[in-house]
Amino acid sequence: MHDHITEIVIFTVLFLLVSGMGFVAARWRAPQDMLHLDEWGLGGRSFGAWITWFLIGGDLYTAYTFVAVPALIFGAGAAGFFAVPYTVIIYPMVFLVLIRLWSVSHRHGFVTPADFVRTRFGSPTLALLVAITGIVATMPYIALQLVGIEAVLKAMGVTGEGWLARHAPIIVAFAILAAYTYQSGLRAPALIAFVKDTLIYIVILVAVLYLPYKLGGWGHIFDAADAKFTASPAPNDGILLNANNQLQYVTLALGSALALFLYPHSITGVLASRNRTVIKRNMSALPAYSLLLGLIALLGYMAISAGVKPLPGSRAGTVDSNTVVPLLFDQQFPAWFAGVAFAAIGIGALVPAAIMSIAAANLFTRNIYKEYLRPDATPAQEAHVSKITSLVVKIGAVAFILFLDPQFSIDLQLIGGVIILQTLPAVALGLYTRWFHRGGLIAGWVTGMGLGMWMLYQIPNAATGRRHFGGSAFPLSEFGFDTKRTIYVGLVAVLVNLLVAVVATLILRATNTPDGADGTVADDYFADEGDPRLEKTRVTPEAVGSST
């Protein structure tokens, strides 16, 4: 640890600085009363283009992305680049979808996607399924932000002897996060995102200019990577995809794109926007982060060229590939700049973890607590329950890391993508059509979820020796095809989900089975800031004060 004093000092100072900003954020654009989900959970629904750009960018491009994407490319080669195309194609796909969601949500006061489903299909059961799906898919995602921080701490030698000493920095970091999120709500990650994203842009731009110069140029970097994969006996791709992995690459990229804005935390950032124009501008500008992600991915090849050796993993005989990027920075950058880079990764965990915990808490409060436990809850009571729930969610995320193998948390996040995709028919398609019967959507969800879990159960993880739930690449040979190719589980499951929803809807319509009433009208999906009906439903600080 004595060799990393400069790095530790700079990391600690910057970490404490942004933590202080998290507490100050409660006074930033402060309403008269924070005890309303519109204020605590959605920042007053008032964020403009720049704030939203930093907030959503900080939410989607996380600390785990910073370390995991280059680590995947370091270990497996070209397959790791799937994260780049999926974050490119998603924005044109959701450009029109999200503005419809914003309009109907603001006119009706929806805080979560399950709120929309409840009103659109008149089904508390379907809304409950969407809420539970969102919470379950989000939990391991929060835990993975800790994986990014742990990788940085390992690289700085902050590991300690014994269980408590080893995990104490993580516990302290998330305790601080929990405190300022409880106080400031969504305003905290929105304010911190400015610092986080600025640091990451600086670090990556310096890295892609300085490191190739130091390592002998891009030609040498790619040659070193190609030599490593050519000499490896493992069936990796190398710097190009092999034929067996192309289908997996395409389906994983497409499935991940479809899932990205179904996650509750992604929708939370969208609903916090001021108007439809803010969302349009952000869907046009957010691909700048995808360019940054492409540069981040290349750090994996740089680490190969630099001869980086990952630190040992938590299991005997394994390595922690997530330490590749922190070790690259530690070995190649001056100590002071390595400290800045480590702080960028560490702070990069705080923004998404805060938003994710808020989103999960909002789902519980609106679609479980208020729907089933206390229907007459006041806005102040909702906000209070959501704040408490956000603390519980963070404690659960820390428990994931403390008591489970971190690799299992990574696999759980892959499973999370499969899970959240099953809400696509109700949430995304529901924004455009009310043709589906609520019973058909429930049948599709049950079938898609069941098939997805069965497929995931069949997938082993050779690296850890686990026989089940070892990833999301399903071998087509299990379906009777004579091939070594694999396919992304989530895409197969959601297609079956859709098929069942269509067939079940036709049957239920033919048998005149009662359906839920649609609580929305066509005009709801085009409402914008300044719309008279929108102003009537928008919660103002004065209204919050009178309701409490």
Image (cartoon, rainbow, N blue to C red):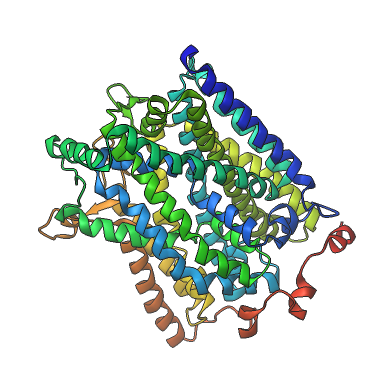
Q: Position of residue 331 (x, y in %)?
A: 38, 25
Q: Quadrant of residue 123?
A: bottom right
Give the side of residue 529 with respect to residue 451, left or right: right
Q: Quadrant of residue 391?
A: top right
Q: Quadrant of the C terminus?
A: bottom right
Q: Residue at x 39, y 37 (%)?
A: 210
In the picture shown, does residue 100 fall above or below 371?
below
State how many labels appear: 0
Residue 535 visible? The answer is: yes
Looking at the picture, tell me which residue is in the foreground, 505 or 102.
102
Residue 123 visible? The answer is: no
Q: Residue at x 15, y 35 (%)?
A: 232
Q: Position of residue 451 (x, y in %)?
A: 33, 59
Give the side of residue 106 with respect to residue 120, left or right: right
In the picture shown, does residue 226 fall above or below 512?
above
Q: Residue at x 59, y 53 (%)?
A: 54
Q: Quadrant of residue 488?
A: bottom left
Q: Position of residue 257 (x, y in %)?
A: 40, 61
Q: Position of residue 388 (x, y in %)?
A: 70, 43
Looking at the picture, tell me which residue is in the foreground, 263 or 17.
17
Q: Residue at x 57, y 67 (%)?
A: 281
Give the side of residue 133 with respect to residue 407, left or right: right
